[in-house]
Image (tube, grey):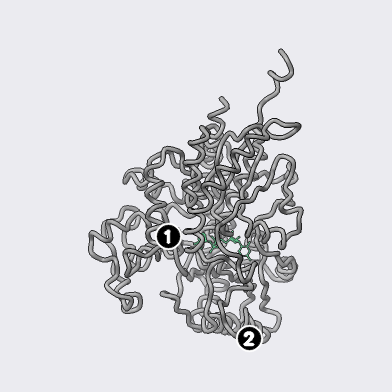
Amino acid sequence: MSENKTKRRRPHAVCIPYPAQGHIGPMLKLAKLLHSSPHNFHISFVNTHHNHRRLQRAHGSAAVSGLPSFRFHVIPDGLPPADNPDATQDIASLCISINETCPNALRDLLSELNSVAGAGDGPGPVSCVVADAGMWFAVDVAEEFGVPAVRFWTASACALLGYAQYESLVQKGVIPLPDSSCLTNGYLDKVVEGIPSMEGITLKHPPSFIRTTDANDFMLNYLRRCVQTVSESRCPLIFNTFEALEGPILQTLATAKITNTPDLTIGPLSFLLPKTNTENHSTIRSSLLPEDPSCLSWLDSKPPDSVIYVSFGSVATLTPHQVIEFACGLVNSEQNFLWVIRPDLVGTSELGSGAVARQLVGGAQGRGMLASWCDQEMVLAHPAVGGFLTHCGWNSTIEAIGNGVAVVCWPFFADQQTNSWFCCEKWGAGVEIGGGGEVRREEVERVARTVVDGDKGKEMRWKAREWKRLAEEASLSPNGSSYINFKKLVDHLLGSLN
Ligand code: UDX
């Protein structure tokens, strides 16, 4: 047999995340997994110019030069240059512009990748596409090129179930909300009956985009379109979750025909990544901001389970009043805390990002540390961290559960209310504070004490550690659901090569 015939063709995956931190992170983990799998996928990872530049500013050019078999490519997002190139882009504007700009840009990229395929040591033609569920056009492009695709729903399964309730809540006459006073007058405390897997849920906890007064709201309709594409999809849908945690919800999604294809839970993704990195992935980073390494040495100086870690993800912006309430509550609790204050966390405040918090935290006498960004997974894995005050973005939630950390939930928007409800009511690892954006220093003080010191905190940590054990079982054991599902995913992606 000639050498050419015996040489195995390396599959070539194009991975395209929705262009925001909470989506780039899980997609990059999945890309690393495919790259380091026994099939050694060649990866073409697609970022927008804006995020490509952010990665480069945060970590230097090594972060975007990739590896010979793990390349980064850029496409425009269609938005004008941002005033602050390091601030999170407006999500609604991004949703509009990417759908106008990215389909053709992706087509051109795939054509270009195919036109140079096989030259020298380069990769073969594109053989599959991994598309964020918010980038639905990418699956159509994959079909045009005749290669298999998967959709990656990077949020929770419970969020998808929540979004899919819009029509039934309209039929029940509870939404659209009669007017905006409903957000604060107790209307949302009503229990919504008849949603399988969500028995006892109040109107406060379906995703915020569907609890609108305006049926024409852009984000509502964008998410409805996402749900619709998922329901009509002919390709597998993957989730960064695990069977033991969200299996019953996936079952409900399938029974209600909200999902239409095999759902593959492959989370928590970090667990599936090999512990010894033979692929030299360390230069490939997903954080759009530089991480402050001193967070970890500060944690080293604290006793086990004694620190509450505070972060509200990459999108939420707080008012100066909210920042002051959190700062006072944390300082008054007399507990250790590590608080991430992103440069753009406090919107357009004339007080400047975090300036107020810095002043207040100055009085915490070494108990408090502020950072502008950190390696959150390393922080959550640190033995000193006993609790996490979070907005309940799905990545933060699954990272907390995967590390056995109890959560204090202050849901902000989108899917976060639903994640919070499941954490507190179904998974036993959380307690919720606030509501409708409200935050009171007394409540922060009380809950910070409880989560670190109180019986309720111990109970939530115990429960979270049990979830961690089940997450490990799902991902590390050859019989584990995430382990098996990842193999199924690979088989699907290899489809065009077999
Ligand atoms: C967005 C939405 O807001 C969220 O509701 C949805 O579930 C996912 O997309 P975001 O608000 O950024 O995400 O929150 P989250 O999903 O928690 O993602 C934040 C990511 O940033 C996490 O992976 C976290 O590890 C990382 N992070 C956060 C850091 O690496 N360092 C930090 O200092 C803070």
Q: Position of residue 460 (x, y in %)?
A: 50, 64
Asked whether mark 2 lies closer than 8 Å to ligand 1, one says no
Q: Quadrant of residue 78?
A: bottom right
Q: Which residue is mark 2?
A: 360
Q: Which residue is mark 1?
A: 422
**Residue drawn at (49%, 44%), measured in percent from left and top?**
151
Residue 260's tag is none
146 displayed left or right of 251: right
Tell me the crowding category of disc 1: few under 14, some 14 to 19, or many 20 or more residues within 10 angstroms, Cα based.
Answer: many
Marks 2/1: CA–CA distance = 33 Å
**Residue drawn at (53%, 35%), measured in percent from left and top?**
145
Q: Secondary structure at mark 2?
A: helix
Q: Secondary structure at mark 1?
A: helix
Name the amino acid, label 2: Leu
Asked whether mark 1 lies closer than 8 Å to ligand 1, one says no
Query: Quadrant where the C terminus lies?
Result: top right
Foreground mark, 2 or 1, reads 2
Query: Quadrant where the N terminus lies?
Result: top right
Residue 340 in view (yes/no)? no
Q: Position of residue 155 (x, y in %)?
A: 48, 55
Name the amino acid, label 1: Phe
Residue 431 in view (yes/no)? yes
As drawn, the residue found furthest toward the top would be: 1
Quadrant of the rendered image holding ligand 1: bottom right
* 477 versus 90 height, above or below: above
Q: Earlier in the sequence, mark 2 or mark 1?
A: 2
